[in-house]
Image (cartoon, rainbow, N blue to C red):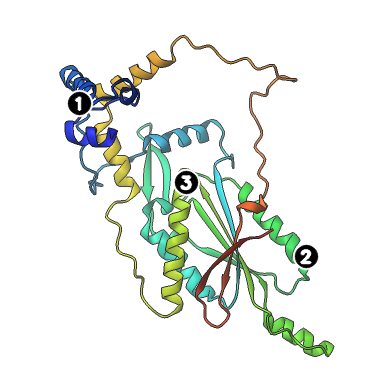
Amino acid sequence: MISRIRAEFQIEIPLKSLFEAPTVAAMAAQIAQLQRENQHVATPPLVPMSRESAIPLSFAQQRLWFIDQMEPANAAYNIPLALRLSGDLNAEALVRSLQEIVNRHEILRTSFVVQDEQPVQIIHSADTFQVRQLNISELVASARDTLIKQLALEDAQRPFDLTEAPLMRATLVRCSDPRLQSTASESSGSEALDEQESEFVLLLTMHHIVSDGWSMGVLLRELSVLYHAYSHGKPSPLSNLAIQYADVALWERSWLHGDLMDYHLNYWKQQLSGFTSLQLPTDRPGRRCQPVMVRPISSLCRQRSLKRSRPSASKRERPCS
């Protein structure tokens, strides 16, 4: 309702007004009062913006950039993801899919630098993104599991330099190869199991300044669509993006400033005035700088199986350890 009122009347109505004015007549009075006070939003439409001048950071990005200036080399805002892939994986198609995602989304190849004492976004070529590939299939199972956990933890804990693009890392690890298992079985005189499959682990890590939980879902959906197309020799079925995140930042800065910004800042200053710090009865003094520890959580990892006959992803997913 707030969005509809904003679009129709070009005013910003507080959420509490919905509860203070529960009738149509009362809401109409609220709208009329706000119009008289001339608190217009005048939100422009979100369209592709000119890139002739430097691209500023969005307000959300600037918060993360500011934190990084206070605590550089901090991995607290890394977003790690590990996918275990089993089946007849087409590694070339998977790598190509990841490269196309980086090519489609400018934000994944963006760095953040200071120009004229202000942070700005710099969009780079998609060539800056490379997928690291490792093969540990010759190791015994216990050694492979240990190494995978170590690689995942190290990647999750390795900080990004926001001035260097891309702020996304990808590592594809081959964990097992049925061809090696078959050779080993033949040399030992035993028969190879028919259900043996190749197994891979894909490690992805991004900085929160270029991604979030919702964006990760978009990435995985696009990865599935692109992989299915490329593994069958077809072109990308995804249409070009009309809006990039740089457009969102430019759009946000184009209208949320001046009197409107002062209005919102004053509102929160009034709302938060008079509050004191909450003193909790802790058992020990707090630290000025809280260390950040990153640990793998098995329940957040999803295992995606690939059909052995063809490199097309199935719909079956299950947690993996």
| Label 3 secondary element | loop
What mark, if any, has residue 40 been given in the picture?
1
- Residue 238 falls left or right of residue 230: left
Q: Does 165 appear above or below 95? A: above
Q: Does 243 appear above or below 276? A: below
Q: Residue 59: where, in percent of width, then height?
A: 38, 34
**N-terminal label among 3 and 2:** 2
Q: Does 202 appear above or below 243? A: below
Which quadrant holds the C terminus?
Answer: bottom right
**N-terminal label among 1 and 3:** 1
Q: Nearer the viewer, residue 15 or 65?
A: 15
Q: Residue 186: where, in percent of width, then height?
A: 78, 90
What mark, if any, has residue 212 been given in the picture?
3
Q: Residue at x 56, y 45 (%)?
A: 78
Q: Amino acid at mark 2?
A: Ala
**N-terminal label among 2 and 1:** 1
Task: Sort mark 3 into few (<14), some (14-19) or many (20+) by Cα contacts within 10 Å.
Answer: some
Task: Sort mark 1 into few (<14), some (14-19) or many (20+) by Cα contacts within 10 Å.
Answer: some
Which quadrant holds the N terminus?
Answer: top left
Q: Residue at x 56, y 33 (%)?
A: 71
- How far is mark 1 from mark 3, CA to CA? 31 Å
On the question of residue 170 being in view, the answer is: yes
Q: Nearer the viewer, residue 126 or 208?
A: 208
- Residue 196 falls left or right of residue 218: right
Front of the two marks 2 and 1: 1
Q: How many marks?
A: 3
Q: Residue at x 51, y 72 (%)?
A: 313
Query: Which residue does the numbered mark 2 point to in the structure image?
Result: 143
- Residue 26 falls left or right of residue 115: left
- How far is mark 2 from mark 1, CA to CA? 63 Å
Quadrant of the rendered image containing residue 74: top right
